[in-house]
Image: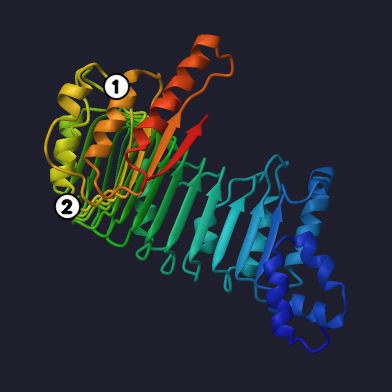
Amino acid sequence: MENLPVEVIGNILSFLGAARDVVLASATCRKWRDAFREHLQVLSFNSNDWAAYRDLTTSQLEILITQTIFQTTGLKSLYIMMDNVDEFSASTVTAWLMYTREMLRQLFYNVCTNINMNILEICGRQKLEMLLLAHNSITGVEPTFQRFPCLTSLSLNSVTISALDLSLLLTACPKIESLELVNPIIAMSDAQVIVELSSSSLKNLYIEVVSLDKFIIEAESIERLHLKDCSFDVFELIGKGTLKQFIIDEGSMIHLELTETVENLEVVDISNFAIMWKNFYQMISKSLKLRRLRLWDVIFDDEDEMVDIETIAVCFPQLTHLSLSYDLGDGILDYGLPGSSHLENVLVLELGWTIISDLFTHWVDGLLKRSPNLQKLVIHGFVSDTNSLEECQTLANFTSSIVELMREYIHVQVQFEYV
């Protein structure tokens, strides 16, 4: 250890991250203290890392954080994540950010202050590349003065912001590639809440727990869109055929439109969501490069609707991974399975149920016959904690029928996953 260059020691301390661990390690000797002062790049104050943070008064915490930060000279990543901690002095927090902002590349900020601070004004026009803000308020965005020329990743968690300021903030980040919006509080000026965003560089968009009348995003370079637990009357993505992954996890939408974005789709993953199969299929039907299709616990708006396997086989010839789980109607064998086209390239098939029935076994059999090159079959099911003797017998019979069925497909690996 004596021969380690001071720069390497600085990297070791940076990997520790948590302020308490870094300070303790730097007390080893003078060389490690020098590395802490001159070569430490990452420093994290997180109330979840050390329970003693909550035992300190706000004033003591401010002094502790101030003394630690002001001993460093080259921080590139600063985490100040103080959940369930009383309000800090705005002037003190401003001093932390002013001291580090010129070298800082990443800022993770969740701090409540006695006066609302303008983080954009303090950190704008610097070299910041990643910014996470939580439980703060953003107002009066001025893209000309509060510009983030190097920012590539922006995450807003439980941040209060108007639709206009959100749009202006995105404009102020000309190189942004990743945007996360988690439970934002969108300030309303009208009865109808409409968010319109535009970015030529955005590649990844993640939206969670958002409820709006209309959300429109124009992103000509977008590659990944993930919507989780969202509710929109209208959601529209306007792109230029770059979208590769489209994921919806829970939520509801009256109207969903992907404009000029689906030609290069490789992954479509829809779960716990109500869809109209015909409309949804028409929207993704041009996705000839689709490799993974997952429709899990989907609810069809029309009770008579079901996934048409023939259509999937014909329109998605490169499909390698197919996952299906939904309530099987009586017409599944008559309308969902018939056809002659095979799922030639499907290697993995995942199938699930909510209610065990003989219908499911027949459905599995039909899909196996359509998948000549299948390598793996995964059966997902739900088992109640309070099963009756009859329900246990039904499950046993079902498992036996699947095992018997798979004797015809000895080359296929079978896996059962019950929850």
Which quarter of the picture shows residue 29?
Answer: bottom right
Using the image, determine if residue 219 lies above or below residue 377.
below
Looking at the picture, tell me which residue is in the foreground, 148 or 305.
305
Q: Quadrant of the N terminus?
A: bottom right
- Does any portion of residue 14 appear in the rendered image? yes
- Does any portion of residue 142 appear in the rendered image? no
Q: Earlier in the sequence, mark 2 or mark 1?
A: 2
Q: Tell me the kind of residue under disc 2.
A: Leu
Classify mark 1: helix, strand or loop: loop
Q: Is residue 323 left or right of residue 148?
A: left
Q: Residue 326, position in %: x, y?
A: 33, 26
Frontmost of labels 2 and 1 is 1
Looking at the picture, tell me which residue is in the foreground, 359 or 305.
359
Residue shown at 83% from the left, 52% from the top: 60
Q: Which residue is mark 1?
A: 328
Q: Residue 2, position in %: x, y?
A: 83, 86
Q: Residue 146, position in %: x, y?
A: 44, 61
Residue shown at 32% from the left, 28% from the top: 298
Q: Is residue 167 left or right of residue 183?
A: left
Which mark, residue 296? none
How far apart in space, not on screen, are marks 2 and 1 (Cα)?
A: 27 Å
Which quarter of the picture shows residue 308?
Answer: top left
Q: Tell me the kind of residue under disc 1.
A: Leu
Q: How many marks?
A: 2
Looking at the picture, tell me which residue is in the foreground, 89 or 350.
350
Q: Residue 412, position in %: x, y?
A: 37, 46
Category of crowding for the residue at label 1, using alpha-carbon neighbours closer than 10 angstroms: few (below 14), some (14–19), many (at least 20) = many
Classify mark 2: helix, strand or loop: loop
Which quarter of the picture shows residue 15?
Answer: bottom right
Which mark, residue 288? 2
